[in-house]
Amino acid sequence: MELSKKDRLLLINQYKILSLLDSGESDHYKELIEILESGYEIFYPMVDQLISDDMPSEKGKFVLEVLGMYRAIEDLKRIKYNEDISKEHFSFFRGFDGNEETEYMSFTRFLIEIQGKFSEQIQYLKDNDNLNSHMQTIDKYSGMLKKWEELGKNYQLTEEQVLEILKAERG
C-alpha cells in the first residue's frame, strides 16, 4: 500500500482522535500513529488490515440469487409441510463456507443482519452456525440455481419443483 504524506497526516489525525475516544484500543492507535509518523512502510498493511478487498458484483449477484431461490423454497414450506423436502440436506439455506467462501458468507451476513433482508433466514442461524456451512456450497447452489432457472425461476414453486431444485447436482 502506498500512502502519501498527506494520506499519512490525515490518518495520524484520525488515529489520534480515535485513541482519545476509544481508550480500550488506545495502544493500538498509538502504534499505528508511530508507524505513520515514522514512515515504516513495511507496517503500512497494518493500517488497512481491517478493510477487505472489493467484492466483485458477480459474487454479490450470486448470493442474492441464492437467497431469492431459498425465499421461494421457504414460501412453499410455509404453506405446506413436506417430509421429503425436510429430509433433504439443503432443505434450508446452509450458508457459505467460512474458510473458502468467506466473501459470500460475509455478504450474506450483511444482507440479513445489517440490512434486514431475507429475514426468513433468521430462524436458521443456529442450524447453519450463523451462515457458516463449514463446507463448500457454491457448486451445489450453482446447480440448484440452474435447475430453478430451467423451471422458469418461479417464486411460486410446487413441492415437486422444490425437490428437483434440492436434488440438483453440483453446477
Image (cartoon, grey):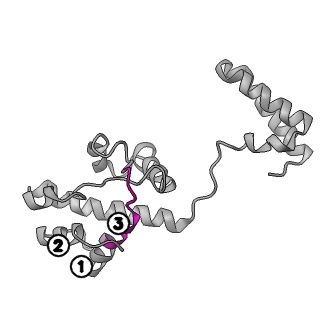
Residue that mark 3 sits on: 141
Please say if 90 is above or below 163: above
| Frontmost residue, 30 versus 21 | 30
Q: Position of residue 102 (x, y in %)?
A: 49, 52
Residue in the image at 18% along x and 59% along y: 88
Disc 1 marks a residue whose amino acid type is: Leu
Provide residue 101's location: percent of width, then percent of height.
47, 56
Of the two numbered discs 3 and 1 in the rendering, the one whose residue sits closer to the viewer: 3
Q: Is residue 144 above or below residue 129?
A: below
Q: CA distance from mark 2 to mark 3?
A: 15 Å
Give coordinates of residue 166: x percent, y percent.
22, 66
Q: Residue furthest top?
A: 23
> Which element carries disc 1, helix, strand or loop?
loop
What kind of element bears circle 2?
Answer: helix
Graded by Cα atoms within 10 Å as few (under 14), some (14 to 19) or many (20 or more), the crowding at tag 3 reads many
Q: Viewed as shown, does residue 99 lie left or right of 136? A: right
Select label 2 or label 3 by which is in front.
Answer: 3
Please say whether residue 121 is one of the residues in the magenta stretch: no
**Which residue corresponds to mark 1?**
151
Q: Residue 65: horizontal and vertical position, in percent?
A: 38, 66
The answer, for residue 157, to whether it is visible in the render is no
Helix, strand or loop at disc 3? helix
Q: Which mark is residue 161?
A: 2
Of the residues under marks 1 and 2, which one precedes in the sequence? 1
Left-right relation of 63 to 22? left
Asked if residue 170 is positioned above or below residue 97 in the image, the reply reads below
Give the residue type at disc 2: Gln
- Say whether disc 2 or disc 3 marks the residue closer to the N-terminus: 3
- Residue segment shown in magenta: 134-143
* Residue found 45% across the figure and 49% down from its top: 98
Q: Is residue 73 visible?
A: yes
